[in-house]
């Protein structure tokens, strides 16, 4: 019991971040700006403010302020579930017989079940402060919808969630959690929007997609007085809010006198990866340290490893601004893997730029069954059942720890355990029944997706 | 943000309990002993050791040692998820506009989703240390089965879980979690035991009951070499292990210079209630303080409020020792409420004795819909979705806080939030659809149950 480093490290209240960290202030080359497809010019603050709450639009465009103060009301909410623990994976290390020291930041200990709450509460707060009457959003796997429903319940703000229809049908319990927190769930495609009606008239049995749900949520926000749309990933503002993960992780590691050699995060839209790595990326950009960053994506949706770095729409309905990012094309339809949070054609522009410029060292695409193998190894050792998304990071952390077993290196590995898998048990049932499959898209499938990229003059 | 008392209080490692607290050492009158129904004499250590691991049998009969040292391996496991936070319910207080100060100990932050893990790890440890080859148990709602599967995975000990068949069918996801941690789940009644076969021959479509599952688990343990049975509630040893809840709660409250006026726990078999109140009950028995204790039970299964204080079997199959306890009769079949963990005909002998002698001041029976009303008020305020069992304590905590609003008293309320409701969403769906019903048994139904009480010479 007399370990120098405890199993769980919680920061003291006075060590908690009081500001978010804006990585863009430390990037010598900034990500190319969002483009308005109507004018083909960079999106202005006014234009963005018609989609997002004013302060969030300002944050989206802010490239200069390194630290942005977290408002008191948000700090108070963070206090209800933060700091999240930094965990030393002693039991996993023992099982792997590795000399590596493995740490993970566990963001799944709140009822939303993931890190998504960090940005949800910020976005709901700014919307409320501006006097908005309601919000809309989309959700796929449901973690973001749950987080935003919790935040809107706290600030007493009505919320409509367009939930990918196939998810709403397959996950009635996840839908019920969102409804328990007062969120109004509309399976998408729906008859409430022009986009939805168009899709339904073409295919009345459509199960929907994340891209379609985004389009419906944006359309509804635009057509509802005093309403705005909010998004749980991809955007710079989301990475800003998620920076609390990395700031806390670094403060906790510092207190243990540890510095990671390898930092690993799963990558869907980029919210948790960007949140985890930001503080350490600041060290790297300023040449204070050189940790090795690894982004992990599903081989069924390989935007970083097989996509193009190009301007693309953020949604399938092609009504959002254009972002320059690693993308498979907004027309790419990933196979139905269980890690719904990673089934996105694009990638955060900040993450994309950091990867393009070599600051994120590596991206790895891993297969679904290998991810669930890793999830089982982890959960039986560490006693936490991970979300399929999070298990992508676990997979690579275990791979790296095994390499250390071979080489004898005592490397320090840090990854983000973004969430829990309590609402993903149908995936685990399929895995235990050995009915889980893998699908890596063929070159032809990738080409078809990339053909949907907009032609820029 | 400059609150004197933080939202969440975590004990420092050096403040954690190193011993369990055995309340029996402070009881002037002990609970009457367990009786062997074959001899009608108090159960001996040898007899108990044929059912339970040796050290657990010793703990069951230990009435003299006030503190029992927690072995290092158990402390190390506790370290992976303890201390649990003591939470000041600021948001609930604000919503209720009460001058009361409400605290809750949150035991649901581990993957098993409840306090059950505290005893599961202890029982698995002692079984492993003794060199046992396997364990059996039963589970109803599934929290105990999950907790024991996690503990057995940690100590590499095979486990068979008899799961009430209707639960296994209604909760395939809960079953999958148990299986993910390596537990073998057998829906009960089954053809693997004589008891099960007898029940199935009488009713091939039987959905089973907790009492039947207990009987099957005990029978299998008895017929399997080097195997023992373990139980997640009712027993003195379980209350001993669960004392970490109350010891931690009291240490945390002490550090805040707070002392509860009212202490509330839900009561099924008594494991969480006994665990929560023990440290404060020690104060009361030794006349150091006089907090008001309230046990909350479902009005559909009202063992304390409408049962008899009598010797009864712990199982429906009538093969366990007899315990003197508040009971509705082992033949009583409670209605199908969603708080499966509270659907038990009996009550911990320690809790029963403390209630009988007036040390537990009050028992209240509450209706299912009022419990879910309280769960919704709590979850939207505090951001934690409670298990239906836990929501019984919430219901009475809210009632007491509302009384303070009327009287203006600034009373300090402490309750135990035993677990989360992530696997109880079908109950919430029913509640939201306004299809949830209440059933308080008629006097005739109660009489029928009490007729099953054994006739003692």
Image: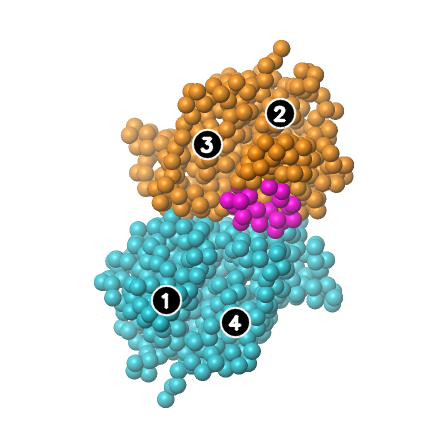
Chain colours: A cyan, B orange
Residue behind mark 2:
B318
Instruction: Give me the C-alpha separation between circle 2 and circle 1.
Output: 58 Å
Instruction: Give me the C-alpha separation between circle 4 and circle 1.
Output: 26 Å
For the N terminus of chain A, give its image quadrant: top right
* Chain at numbered mark 4: A
Mark 1, mark 3: which one is toward the viewer? 1
Residue behind mark 4:
A301
- At numbered mark 1, what does the secondary structure look like: helix, strand or loop? loop
- Residue, x 70% and y 30% (percent of image)? B51
* Labels 1 and 3 share a subunit: no
B303 on left or right of A405 = left
Q: Quadrant of residue B118?
A: top right
Magenta stretch: includes residue B303:
no
Up/down of A45 relative to B207, above or below: below
Given contact means CB atoms under 8 Å apart, are the residues at marks 3 and 4 in contact? no
- At numbered mark 2, what does the secondary structure look like: helix, strand or loop? loop
For the C terminus of chain A, give its image quadrant: bottom left
B313 on left or right of A324 = right
- At numbered mark 3, what does the secondary structure look like: helix, strand or loop? loop
Q: Please state the horizontal and vertical placement of residue B235, each as a whole percent of the image.
A: 61, 28
Tell me if residue A9 can be seen: yes
Q: In which quarter of the image is residue A377?
A: bottom right
Q: Give the range drawn in magenta.
A: B167-187
Question: Magenta part mainly helix, strand or loop?
Answer: helix
Instruction: Give me the C-alpha separation between circle 3 and circle 2.
Output: 21 Å
Residue behind mark 1:
A204
């Amino acid at each position: 019991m007399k370990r120098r480093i405890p199993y769980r490290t919680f920061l003291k209240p006075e060590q908690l971040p009081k500001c978010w960290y804006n990585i863009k202030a430390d990037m010598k080359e900034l990500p190319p700006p969002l483009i308005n497809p109507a004018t083909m010019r960079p999106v202005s603050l006014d234009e963005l403010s018609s989609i997002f709450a004013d302060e969030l639009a300002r944050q989206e465009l802010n490239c200069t302020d390194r630290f942005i103060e977290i408002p008191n009301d948000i700090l108070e909410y963070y206090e209800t579930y933060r700091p999240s623990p930094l965990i030393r994976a002693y039991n996993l290390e023992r099982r792997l017989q590795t000399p590596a020291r493995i740490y993970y930041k566990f963001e799944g200990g709140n009822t939303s079940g993931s890190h998504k709450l960090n940005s949800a509460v910020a976005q709901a707060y700014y919307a409320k402060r501006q006097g908005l009457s309601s919000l809309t959003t989309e959700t796929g796997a449901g973690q973001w919808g749950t987080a935003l429903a919790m935040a809107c319940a706290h600030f007493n703000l009505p919320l409509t969630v367009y939930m990918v229809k196939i998810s709403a049908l397959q996950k009635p319990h996840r839908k019920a959690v969102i409804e328990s927190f007062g969120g109004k769930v509309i399976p998408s495609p729906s008859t409430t929007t022009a986009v939805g009606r168009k899709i339904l008239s073409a295919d009345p049995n459509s199960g929907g997609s994340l891209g379609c749900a985004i389009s419906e949520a944006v359309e509804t926000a635009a057509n509802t007085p005093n309403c705005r749309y909010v998004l749980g990933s991809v955007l710079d503002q989301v990475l800003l809010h998620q920076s609390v993960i990395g700031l806390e992780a670094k403060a906790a590691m510092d207190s243990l006198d540890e510095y990671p050699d390898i930092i690993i995060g799963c990558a869907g839209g980029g919210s948790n990866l960007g949140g985890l790595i930001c503080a350490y990326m600041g060290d790297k950009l300023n040449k204070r340290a050189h940790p090795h960053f690894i982004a992990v994506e599903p081989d069924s949706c390989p935007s970083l490893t097989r996509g193009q770095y190009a301007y693309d729409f953020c949604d399938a309905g092609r009504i959002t601004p254009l972002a320059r990012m690693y993308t498979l094309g907004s027309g790419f339809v990933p196979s139905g893997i269980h890690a719904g949070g990673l089934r996105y054609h694009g990638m955060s522009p900040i993450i994309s730029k950091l990867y393009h410029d070599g600051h994120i060292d590596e991206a790895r695409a891993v297969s679904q069954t290998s991810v669930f193998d890793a999830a089982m190894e982890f959960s039986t050792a560490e006693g936490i059942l991970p979300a399929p998304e999070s298990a992508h990071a676990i997979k690579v952390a275990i791979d790296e720890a095994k390499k250390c077993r071979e080489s004898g290196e005592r490397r320090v590995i840090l990854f983000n355990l973004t969430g829990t898998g309590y609402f993903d048990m149908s995936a685990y049932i399929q895995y235990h029944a050995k009915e889980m499959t893998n699908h890596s898209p063929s070159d032809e499938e990738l080409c078809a997706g990339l053909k949907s990229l907009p032609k820029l003059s």
